[in-house]
Image (cartoon, helix red, strand yellow):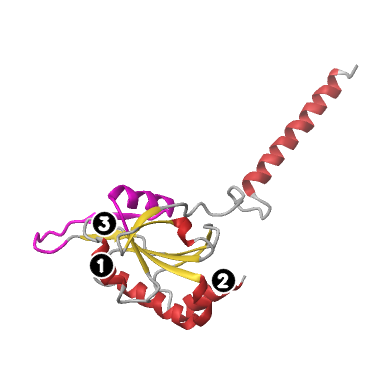
């Protein structure tokens, strides 16, 4: 039967081991404060929306392709058209590789962005662009999935249409629907084309 002293020693060793193990989990192998990051980013997920032709489409309809997803709205004065022009030019620069990528524009302003409005709008950019809208609930659901912020901003002058604050990231999702990477607002054509080329080649 173990002595009282040996039991106390064993409990002490176990306590130290548990403390060290917990510290390793919290600090990580590099010694920096914070938990260890594991797995993939929880961005994206299944969706069902209405395209620019008025047809209900699901994320599964694009299975096997990379999705390049941009959130915005057609009344956006500068940021949205600028981003879509960059996306369009980058896809043109990719040549045949662009066939593996489906560009998608999701409105955060479904009250104004009907399928008809979207069709006219995305027609100004890359011919493969799909515009998606839906009910307020539809848009809220996909925005939550992609961790996208958006908010209606009323203008002080009632004669001026309201604007929408929103996230300006461009998301690249894999053929299986998983998050691959994102591109920040301000990424130029060459930078976006190079990032896409590397992603689809891997």
Q: What residue is shown at x 47% (from left), y 75% (from top)?
A: 192
Q: Is residue 156 magenta?
A: yes
On residue 104, which mark appears? none
Q: In the image as oriented, which residue stretches furthest toward the right?
A: 1
Q: Position of residue 191 (x, y in %)?
A: 48, 78
Image height of 59 relative to 95, above or below: above
Q: Position of residue 109 (x, y in %)?
A: 26, 58
Give the labeled residue for mark 2: 200
Left of 16 or right of it: where is 101?
left
Left of 183 or right of it: where is 113?
left
Q: CA distance from mark 1 to mark 2?
A: 30 Å
Classify mark 3: helix, strand or loop.
loop
Q: Quadrant of residue 80?
A: bottom left
Q: Position of residue 91 (x, y in %)?
A: 45, 78
- Sequence-earlier tag: 3 or 1: 1
Give the labeled residue for mark 3: 110
Q: What residue is shown at x 65% (from left), y 53% (from top)?
A: 31
Q: Position of residue 27 (x, y in %)?
A: 63, 48
- Sequence-earlier tag: 3 or 2: 3
Image: magenta residue range: 133-161
Q: Nearer the viewer, residue 54 or 193?
A: 54
Give the labeled residue for mark 1: 76
Classify mark 2: helix, strand or loop.
helix
Q: Is residue 151 magenta?
A: yes
């Amino acid at each position: 039967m173990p002595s009282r002293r040996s039991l106390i020693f064993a409990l002490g060793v176990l306590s130290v081991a548990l403390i060290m193990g917990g510290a390793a989990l919290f600090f990580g192998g590099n010694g920096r404060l914070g938990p260890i990051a594991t797995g993939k980013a929880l961005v994206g997920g299944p969706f069902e929306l209405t395209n620019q032709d008025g047809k209900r489409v699901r994320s599964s309809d694009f299975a096997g392709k990379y999705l390049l997803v941009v959130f915005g709205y057609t009344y956006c004065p500068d940021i949205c058209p600028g981003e879509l022009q960059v996306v369009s030019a980058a896809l043109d620069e990719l040549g045949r590789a662009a066939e593996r990528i489906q560009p998608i524009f999701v409105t955060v302003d479904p009250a104004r962005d009907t399928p008809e409005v979207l069709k006219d709008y995305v027609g100004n950019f890359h011919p493969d662009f799909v515009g998606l809208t839906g009910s307020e609930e539809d848009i809220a659901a996909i925005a939550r999935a992609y961790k996208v912020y958006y908010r209606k901003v009323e203008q002080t002058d009632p004669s001026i249409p309201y604007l929408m604050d929103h996230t300006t990231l461009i998301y690249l999702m894999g053929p299986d629907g998983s998050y691959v990477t994102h591109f920040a607002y301000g990424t130029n054509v060459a930078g976006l084309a190079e990032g896409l080329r590397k992603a689809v080649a891997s």
